[in-house]
Amino acid sequence: MSTFKTMPIQYGYTKMRCGNISKQMKMKTYFKFKTVSATKSGDYYQVMFHDDLDTEDEPYFMIQSQFEFPEGGACNIESHIAELIEHCKVKMASISKTIMFISYGEAPHHEVEIEYDLQGLGFHELASMLKEMIPEIKIEV
């Protein structure tokens, strides 16, 4: 008997066609992860939402910033889903003790909502690091 691992992840985009014009419509991506980690090493910051990262194809969502060389506030955004990877400035973001929302990218535009568990990481530490990376972030206490 085989068992299947279920992951509450929805993602993608849709295209609408009107005459000879195609318009890409945004869709929201939802993740639910067991934990979040925040790392600072010199001028490099990283926040990663993940489960355990025990396997090579484990789902994750990561935001990185570096302050050594000015990049106009751009962040590296990575995920196990290639369509979500981008180097750009975040348009809008908010964080609470259990959910983060981030909006970024031009074409396509991405909206990602992440539910997570802090598991020992202090919320103020996480919020402080994200505030340095994304100054416009809305922090909901």
Image: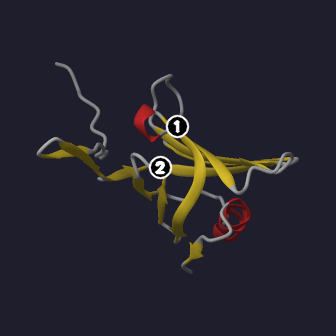
Q: Between marks 1 and 2, how big is the CA–CA gap?
A: 8 Å
Query: In the rendered image, which quarter is residue 11 located in?
Result: top left
Which amino acid does the dot numbered 1 rest on? Asp
Label 1 sits on residue: 52
As drawn, the residue found furthest toward the left would be 19
| Residue tagged 2 | 34
At x 23% / y 26%, what residue is drawn?
A: 3
In the picture, which quadrant includes the C terminus? bottom right
User: Which amino acid, mark 2?
Assistant: Lys
* SS category of the residue bearing label 2: loop
Q: Nearer the viewer, residue 39 or 77?
A: 77
- Give x and y (percent) for residue 111: 40, 56
Q: Is residue 128 left or right of residue 85?
A: right
Mark yes or no: residue 12 visible. yes
Q: Are marks 1 and 2 in contact (CB under 8 Å)?
A: yes
Residue at disc 1, secondary structure: loop
Taking 20 as reference, is 99 left or right? right
Residue 109 position within the rendered picture, expressed as x and y whole percent measured from the top left: 41, 52
